[in-house]
Image (tube, grey):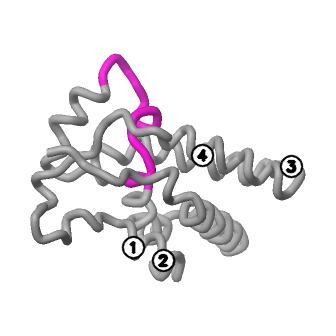
Amino acid sequence: MECWKEEPLVINRIEPWYSSSNRTKSSVLLQLPRSPSVDEILSQYSAYRQKKDGMVADSLREILSGLQRYFDKALSALLLYKNERDQYEVAIKDGVCPSFVYGAEHLLRLFVKLPEILHHANIENESMIELQQELQDFLRFLHKNQSSFFASFYIN
């Protein structure tokens, strides 16, 4: 699956903070809860598509719902770094969904893993093409709104 690895947002936003000489991946965290959260970002995208297209297709609703469900399931298993686990345990309590706590930074980590995940999925070619197009459009939306969606600072 060709997908979005060349998308400028993925290249420029996936963990730029750990490439800085005075920070390491193991020493910084995002402030939680993030605002906007993954849930809010997906809702904003749905509203954007409603305004742009005059409607939100059922297939897009299904894709966004699936993306949120997959994010909630995959966060602890695939998307967290070792140094983020303690913060996760504190942030996700009483059955709170990760998509209500985490934001665009962790959602992009899912996008990095999606091509490999989808490669193993049993999805018809036509559906895969539609899925890929919708996800690429979503990434363009994130890129266009990156100043609103991504943290400009981290905590130690």
Residue 105: say if magenta: yes
- Residue 61 placement (x, y as % from top left): 71, 46
Query: Residue at (43%, 30%) from the top-left corner?
Result: 97
Mark 1 falls on what kind of element? helix
- Kindly identify which residue carries mark 4: 42
Query: Residue at (45%, 38%) from the top-left corner?
Result: 35
- Residue 137 placement (x, y as % from top left): 65, 66
Mark 2 falls on what kind of element? helix
Sequence-wise, the earlier of marks 4 and 2 is: 2
- Residue 69 placement (x, y as % from top left): 51, 41
For the residues carrying marks 4 and 2, which lies nearer the camera in this image?
2
- Kindly identify which residue carries mark 1: 12
- Kindly identify which residue carries mark 2: 8
Mark 3 falls on what kind of element? loop
Amino acid at dot 3: Met
Whether label 1 touches label 2, CB < 8 Å: yes
Sequence-wise, the earlier of marks 4 and 1 is: 1
For the residues carrying marks 3 and 1, which lies nearer the camera in this image?
1
- Kindly identify which residue carries mark 3: 55
- Name the quadrant containing residue 92: top left
Query: Residue at (39%, 41%) from the top-left corner?
Result: 102
Sequence-wise, the earlier of marks 3 and 1 is: 1
**In the image, is 138 to the left or to the right of 81?**
right
- Name the quadrant containing residue 140: bottom right
Magenta segment, which residues? 93-107
Q: Residues within 10 Å of mark 1 (few under 14, many from 20)?
A: few
